[in-house]
Amino acid sequence: MTTQTNSISKMPFVKPTVRASKTKKILLALFRDRYLYLLAIPGILYFLIFKFVPMWGLIISFQNYSPFLGILHSPWVGFEHFQRLFGNEDFKIIFRNTLAISFLNLLLFFPAPIVLSLLLNEVSSSVYKRWIQTVIYFPHFLSWVIIAGITFIMLGQADGLVNEIIAYFGGEKIAFLSEPKTFWLLLVVQNIWRDAGWGTVIFLAAITSVDPALYESARMDGANRFRQIWHITLPGIKNVIIVLLILRIGQVMEVGFEQIYLMSNAPVASLADVFDTYVYRNGVRAGQFSYSAAVGLFKSVIGLIMVLLANRLAKMFGEEGVY
């Protein structure tokens, strides 16, 4: 009894008037920024409904899930599905293909919006600049079905436009779509054409935040346009580049399903099999929901580890990182 009395006596005492004052400040702050909070509600609901609530379903990766029994009554199997995934002969192939495509996207696709933004920033005519932006934004709104169709029309071996031009000048037609050596590169080029322009939105916004006085000082010191880009623009948007790079590294296991599924064919089948297509073929289509969930959980864990490592490296080099 004495001990309980002493512990209660040691608790910090908050006067009711002070607590009421803090509550009033919080309510006033909420009322003052009420429109901002209203704008945030759709985003919060999106993450709650489509990101946090589905995490509950990851439980089935440790079960033999049956739609008739439900999550609560399906039998538990522990790490059986993960052991099956790691012991599968296809695991090394799909892991290699996924990493290779992600690495090429990181190497070639990620810098493309940065270069485009720097070039657009150098365009002095606002009309011409807006026209270019409209043209490079447009492919982002096309579905992968349309983009795959355009690719077939342009690069088809039998009657593709490029091969028709090659044949017209006496050359031999090339099997662009079924050539294993260039299949991964073809996927990256499609990504660049579709999303590089859209990716410039963030970098152009970041460039506008660079102090114009720095450019004026550089010009007075005799710096040409290239040196202004190198010493002012790029350092000015460095933090944005690093944050987006870290987030991109976190998606190392996400190479997309539609694009690869539509572009795959028999000659490149061994190079087109990635985790997403593997899950669709062996998990969803075969009704093995628990196995699909196990593969998805494995991808998420790898992505989380990559984000943590990349953020740690950024901190070691003195950058801000994502948190």
Image (spheres, rainbow, N blue to C red):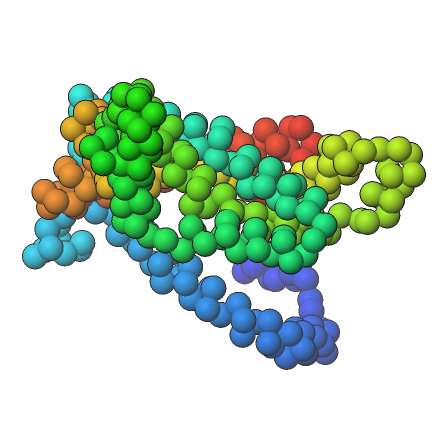
**Which residue is farthest left?**
68
Return the x and y of residue 74 as percentages of the image width and height.
Answer: 13, 50
- Residue at 41% x, 35% y is 189
Q: Nearer the viewer, residue 62 or 239?
A: 239
Return the x and y of residue 132 as percentages of the image width and height.
Answer: 57, 51
Return the x and y of residue 218 as percentages of the image width and height.
Answer: 86, 38
Viewer can see residue 296: no
Figure label count: 0
Image check: 226 left or right of 120?
right
- Residue at 56% x, 53% y is 133
Viewer can see residue 48: yes
- Residue at 19% x, 42% y is 280
- Which quadrant: the C terminus? top right
Return the x and y of residue 80 as percentages of the image width and height.
Answer: 17, 33
**Which residue is farthest right?**
220
- Residue at 64% x, 46% y is 120
Picture quadrant where residue 114 is located? top right
**Above or below 58: residue 165:** above
Q: Nearer the viewer, residue 269 or 75?
A: 269
Image check: 74 left or right of 301?
left
Image check: 17 left or right of 246?
right
Image check: 58 left or right of 245?
left
Q: Nearer the viewer, residue 67 or 271?
A: 271
- Which quadrant: the N terminus? bottom right
**Above or below 172: residue 44:** below
